[in-house]
Amino acid sequence: MDQLNGRCDLHTHSQASDGMQSPAENVKLAKQKGLSALAITDHDTVAGVAEARQTGLEQGIDVVAGVEISTRAGGKDIHVLGYYVNIEDQLFLERLHGLREAREERNHRIIAKLQELGLAISWEEVIEGLGRPLEPDESIGRPHMADVLVSKGYAVDMRDAFDRYLAEGKPGFVSVPRVAPEDACQWIREAGGAAVIAHPGLYGNDELVRQIIEKSQPDGIEVFHSDHGPEEERRYAELAREFELIVTGGSDYHGVRQGVVFHGDLGSKTVAVDVLDQLRAAAKR
């Protein structure tokens, strides 16, 4: 397993947002894969970081305190990753709480739209689908609703649920007011962290990505991602050189749903651990 020694996966999700595994389980899996470090980057919450850190100490895995903040720009949902944030910064925690409130409003509106389409789905079923109590500061996302849609036969699998109902432009999609990427980058910096533009290839608009970089002044860009092919990796590596950005990467691991790994298996996209030194240095500026 030591083929990944000296490597780190800087984009993974846990049950604190829409991942399938506990933060501790993610860390243990990283150990099994032979990774040296792992970031927990849940959506709009840092609720899973403390547990991951404790398990990291036990497993000998360096755990990076991360977050993935949902923003909006150019008519697109844009995600901004934060690394080495202070998870006890009260202002930052209040800001994340506000984002989760907006997310919850969106979730209820999605349920209402699905019901208008004639689909028998309720918020209570989404929570029951977790198979456990919803913990404080955890966030619910569209994958949780997709699980219910699949279990009730409205979709074949997760991808089908998004393609039919939940993806942008589909009948169940709802967009709520979100902060701008430059605000998220500023919040991350004020919380002592380094800001990185997540999976730019998913936005389908490189000119928009360029504009976001120019306006937000992030510290890095996620070049390596499970949904990026070689051409995307080349383009965004070039963009990183042009703007002198840190090159990061990660699997965007969410676990296994209906037998399918989303977005990629933990450890399938990694960067060298010296990237952590670059992120730490950026966070201290």
Image (cartoon, rainbow, N blue to C red):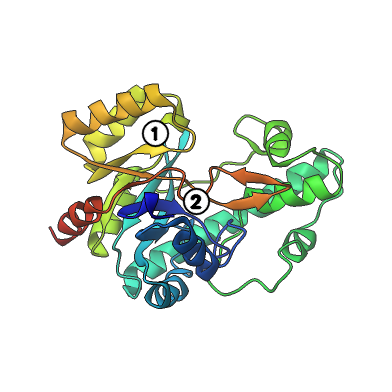
Q: Horizontal and vertical percent for residue 132?
A: 70, 72
- Observer-nearest of 70 and 262: 262
**Mark 2 sits on what residue?**
266
Badge number at residue 200 = 1
Q: Is residue 121 above or below residue 45?
A: above
Q: Earlier in the sequence, mark 1 or mark 2?
A: 1
Give the residue drawn at x 70%, y 42%.
158
| Contact, mark 1 vs mark 2 (Cβ under 8 Å) | no
Secondary structure under tag 2 reads loop
Foreground tag (1 vs 2): 2
Task: Look at the image and tell me in which quarter the N terminus lies.
Answer: bottom left
Residue 172 shows in the view: no
Give the residue drawn at x 61%, y 45%.
261
Q: Is residue 185 above or below residue 126?
A: above
Q: Is residue 131 above or below residue 223?
A: below
Q: Horizontal and vertical percent for residue 91?
A: 33, 70
Give the residue drawn at x 56%, y 55%.
103
Give the residue drawn at x 24%, y 50%.
275
Which amino acid, mark 1?
Pro
Task: Look at the image and tell me in which quarter the C terminus lies.
Answer: bottom left
Q: Horizontal and vertical percent for residue 128?
A: 77, 65
Residue 213 shows in the view: yes
Secondary structure under tag 1 reads helix
Which amino acid, mark 2?
Leu
Q: Along the horizontal axis of the image, is 217 left or right of 18?
A: left
Q: Horizontal and vertical percent for residue 242?
A: 17, 28
- Observer-nearest of 240 and 88: 240
**Where on the picture, by quarter, is residue 88?**
bottom left
Query: Tag 2: Cα neighbours inside 10 Å, few (<14), some, or many (≥20)?
Result: many
Distance between the Cα atoms at labels 1 and 2? 19 Å
Q: Along the horizontal axis of the image, is 45 left or right of 57?
A: right
